[in-house]
Amino acid sequence: MQPPTGSFVLTGLIAASAWVALTLLSVASGYLLERAFRSRRVWALPLAAGQLRRELIGNAIFLAVAILTTALVLEGGVIRFAPPADATVGRGLGTFLVMLLGFQAYYYAAHRLMHHRALVRFHRWHHESRVTTPWSGQSMSWVEALVWMGGYFGVPALLSLLAPLSFGGWVAYLAFNVFGNLVGHANVELVAPRPGLWWQSTLATVFTFHALHHARWTGHFGFASTWADRLFRTEWSDWPDLHGKVWRGEALTSLKQRGQPR
């Protein structure tokens, strides 16, 4: 992606190339990790009938919404970016960090709201994947895809009212987010148990944490961290025990499986 080109079609083509390439790279990385760490599967359960077909359709829907939204936002000047002369490393890093925090806060609120009984029908497509694959991260309805666009574009648009953002820092965060989301849905655990992990998960959590959300539905709403779930008491206290089992090669055998509370 790049700043506005002055042509909606050209910007759309650039956005399409970037979104598709990043998705394919991330999904491939997720499957390679599943193959390399097959002894640390989270779930020893089969995929649902027709799951991969549904996930591919969901990804097509998500990418169509993302590509169109990207072109509209960039050509419409919705986000205020700093001019190239002010594109410093500090502004880029600052943009990345405020996006990291801003997206996580937005996502927790939006995700939890989508679990309300009045809105859950828009989120149900994503939860048809109980045992997840790298394709699961972007498998969703068009309504939920628009909710994600609120995080990718609405959050930075609001932040840029305070100060212009770095285009490079914003793109770097989007790439980080997409890669982490798709790889993070792989059915594998990559993070080893260690002293202080429960506290460290406040900023970056383990794969098992979100896998339990797909199985249980009613908690673990945060994106790649536990701080919001901990703050609003939607964290399950048995995840460290189950995470330890997975790391030891004891894959979970039931979506209803419970561990010892912390």
Image (cartoon, grey):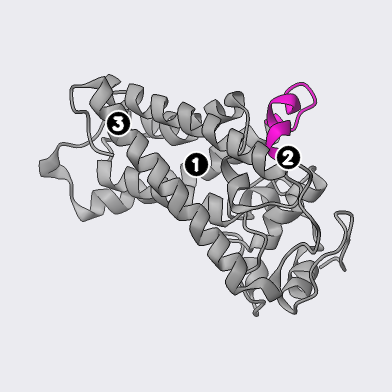
Vertical position of residue 188 compared to residue 129: above or below: below
Expressed as whole percent of the image width and height from the top left, the position of residue 62 reads 53, 32
Instruction: Tell whether 124 sits left or right of 7.
Output: right
Looking at the image, is mark 3 or mark 2 earlier in the sequence? 3
Disc nearer the start of the sequence (3/1): 3
Q: Is residue 259 left or right of residue 169?
A: right
User: Could you tell me how far apart the alpha carbons at marks 2 and 1 are, in whole angstroms?
Assistant: 21 Å
Residue 200 in view: no
Judged by depth in the image, the label closer to the viewer, 3 or 1, is 3
Q: Amino acid at mark 2?
A: His
Q: Amino acid at mark 1?
A: Phe
Disc 1: which residue:
103
Q: Secondary structure at mark 2?
A: helix
Q: Tag count in the figure?
A: 3
Q: Nearer the viewer, residue 199 or 36?
A: 36
Q: Is residue 116 magenta?
A: yes
Numbered range of the magenta stretch:
114-126
Mark 3 sits on what residue? 13
Q: Principal SS element in the magenta part?
A: helix
Front of the two marks 3 and 2: 3
State the separation of the CA atoms marked 3 and 1: 26 Å
Q: Nearer the viewer, mark 2 or mark 1?
A: 2
Q: Secondary structure at mark 3?
A: helix
Question: Element type at marker 1?
Answer: helix
Which of the numbered marks, if any, corresponds to residue 127?
2
Is 189 on the left or on the right of 96, as rendered?
right
